[in-house]
Image (cartoon, rainbow, N blue to C red):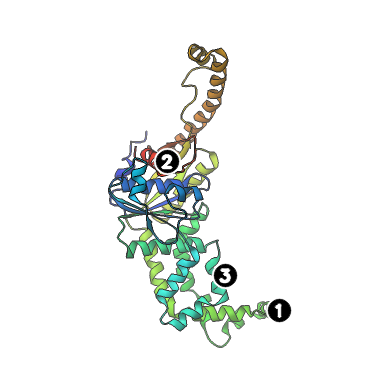
Amino acid sequence: MLKRSPHLAQRLQGKRVCVCLGAGGVGKTTTSAALAFALAERGAKVVVVTIDPARALAAALGLGELSGEPHQIDPQLLAAQGLAAPGELWAMALDVKRTFDEIVTRLSPDASSREEILSNPVYRELSSAVSGVQELSAVTKLYELYREHDFDVIVLDTPPSRNALDFLEAPANLLRFLEGRALKVFVAPGGLAARFLGRSTGLVFAIFARVTGVDMLGELSSFFRSLTGVIDGFGERIQGVAELLRDPATSFLIISSPEPEPAREAVFLAGKLRAAGMARDGVIVNRVHLHGLGGHSVGDLQVLLATELGDSLARRVAHNLADFDVLARRDRDTIARLSQELEEPDPVIVPHLDQDIQDLAGLARIADYLFA
């Protein structure tokens, strides 16, 4: 039998980074914001970094939109909804291109080198891409907030898994590239890249240049050569990110829902975290159906309700609750399997709510469940 585990608030004591991982569609972004609110309620200065937040979440935080820099949530907005946070709640949305531009600006040895990189068409495409670059910009922004700001806790929302694996592996993958042979080939002078790629690949690039007017091989070589002035600094930063993700002050939370597929993703992610030596400090299961027939049959419940509701309405209510009872039993079974497979005796349960989160009071409601 699994032993009871410490309360989530206890597990997060002393943590400076909290990374939320999980499948898409399980309420991970909202949970990240609610977790940040819960920590601010307990006196911490907290920033939540979201990735592609829904407009409703920005509205819930009292902002027209979330920008690429941290903004404090106005305490008067909290007070207007009967809430108080002795700490500070900050929020920002990840801006992929802006994050990369800032890194280049900081690490470039001079203005000429900076402009050469920023104006290169290869860089413009890479820094605006979604796959992979989003994860890399997330970890570099995390490192910046950790090193250069005075937040007590940084709560990071991440892309949906299995893209979450890209997030976990991005620092190591980039370090391998920066230290690898391919990059050395491109930055070497004298057309070594063309000879390395071979005649057939060079022919493809030549045809592409003739048709489009873009010398792709030349642009790639020029781009990588322009990076030589920032590679060392960027490598040091990425090494710092890799170390931060394994630091005892960094915590990972897996967010799931009771549906079978997200639950399988949660088990898969937990295995990857364990293999990578990253600390998992909890499992949160969202949108759980808790109420059904309460152990009664449909007929018995109909009789119990008839006195108050009348026969017709009691019959409809009892049958409606029977439908919810099916979901509640499914959710209990899923949570029991998750507990067993993840050796997590006390996953945090957030019930299925009747409405979307549209304000700070809604976030506070979820925060109460997280630290119940």
Residue located at (55% from left, 24% from top):
320
> What residue is at 52 percent from the left and 53 percent from the top?
162
Secondary structure category for the residue under label 2: helix
- Determine whether the residue tagged by mark 1 lies in a helix, strand or loop: helix
Q: Which circle marks residue 207 in the picture?
A: 1
Identify the residue under disc 3.
125
Q: Is the residue 63 above or below the residue 325 in the image?
A: below
Quadrant (top left/top right/bottom left/bottom right) for the N terminus: top left
User: Given this view, does label 2 or label 1 mark the residue nearer the observer?
Assistant: 2
What is the x, y in percent for residue 201? Answer: 66, 77
Mark 2: amino acid: Gly
Quadrant placement of the C terminus: top left
Q: Earlier in the sequence, mark 2 or mark 3?
A: 3
User: What is the x, y in percent for residue 32?
Assistant: 42, 48
**Which of marks 1 and 2 precedes in the sequence?**
1
Write down the residue under mark 2. 362
Front residue (pair 23, 46): 46
Q: Position of residue 4 (x, y in %)?
A: 33, 36
- Cα gap from disc 2 to disc 1, whole angstroms: 57 Å
Circle nearer the viewer, 2 or 3: 2
Q: Which mark is residue 183?
A: none
Comes first in the chain, label 3 or label 1: 3
**10 Å crowding of disc 2: few (<14), some (14-19), many (20+):** some
